[in-house]
Amino acid sequence: MRKTFLQINSVQTSKKAKEDPATGNPEEFKTYEKSSAGSGIVTLIETIIEDSAKVEAKAVQDEQEAQVAYEDFMTQTRESTKAKNVELDAKMAEKATAKGDLAEEDSSLDSTEAELQHLFETKLSLHKECDFALANFEVRQKARSQELDALVQAKAILGGAKSDDFAGFLQRLRR
């Protein structure tokens, strides 16, 4: 049969230990009292507890500060978003106005171009007439001068002028 460590240890202790007649405890056992080395461990555990309480308090404070900062950030973000939306609406209205102005200017441009085309055609027509008048100016001037002379002689003949003047008039007409 196998024996466990506890069984083996208790058997060995009972063989070696002698009982103290006053307490009834084995002589190897000492009375229970606080160990001088135990105070260092207890102090270490108390320090760890205090440090963990400080860390917890700091974490709670940091969490509260982070919450306040987050709320401030969200408030600023909402205000900024509202301002940007107002600005966007103003820009959209400005864009719509600019599009209206552009359409009006395009219409004005089309009518101006049509008017310019009409004026150009009028210019060409007048230029042709002027070119014709300039090209035939001397011929027309000469014909007009002859016509005036003929009218003067016709007036003179009808007014009782001599026939010699009438013969000169006819010769000039033949030329």
Image (cartoon, rainbow, N blue to C red):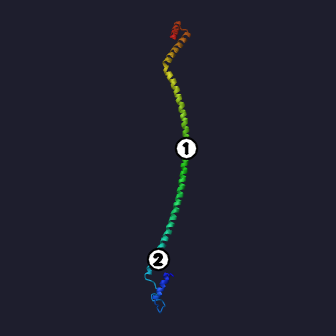
Q: What element carries label 1?
A: helix
Residue sitting at the far top = 163
Quick check: 166 above or below 109? above
17 or 37: nearer the viewer:
17
Callout 2 crowding tier (Cα within 10 Å): few <14, some 14–19, many ≥20:
few
Q: Identify residue type, mark 1.
A: Lys
Q: Where is residue 148 in the image (x, y as percent from the top left)?
A: 52, 15
Residue at numbered disc 1: 99
Q: Which of marks 1 and 2 is in front?
A: 2
Residue lying at 51% horizontally and 67% vertically, measured from the top left: 63
Q: Where is residue 5 in the image (x, y as percent from the top left)?
A: 48, 81
> Regarding mark 2 in the picture, which secondary structure is present there?
helix
Total of numbered circles in the picture? 2
How far apart are the alpha carbons under marks 1 and 2? 77 Å
Compared with 110, 77 (above or below) is below
Q: Residue at x 50, y 83 (%)?
A: 7
Q: Residue furthest bottom?
A: 21
Tell me which amino acid carries mark 2: Ile
> Mark 2 = which residue?
45
Residue 45 point in image, percent of width and height: 46, 77
Snapshot quadrant of residue 157: top right
Dot 1: few (<14), some (14–19), or many (≥20) neighbours within 10 Å?
Answer: few
Seen at 53% across and 60% down, the residue is 74
Q: In this view, does 40 lie above or below 87?
A: below
How far across and how far down the image is residue 153, in percent?
53, 11
Which residue sits at x=53%, y=31%? Answer: 117
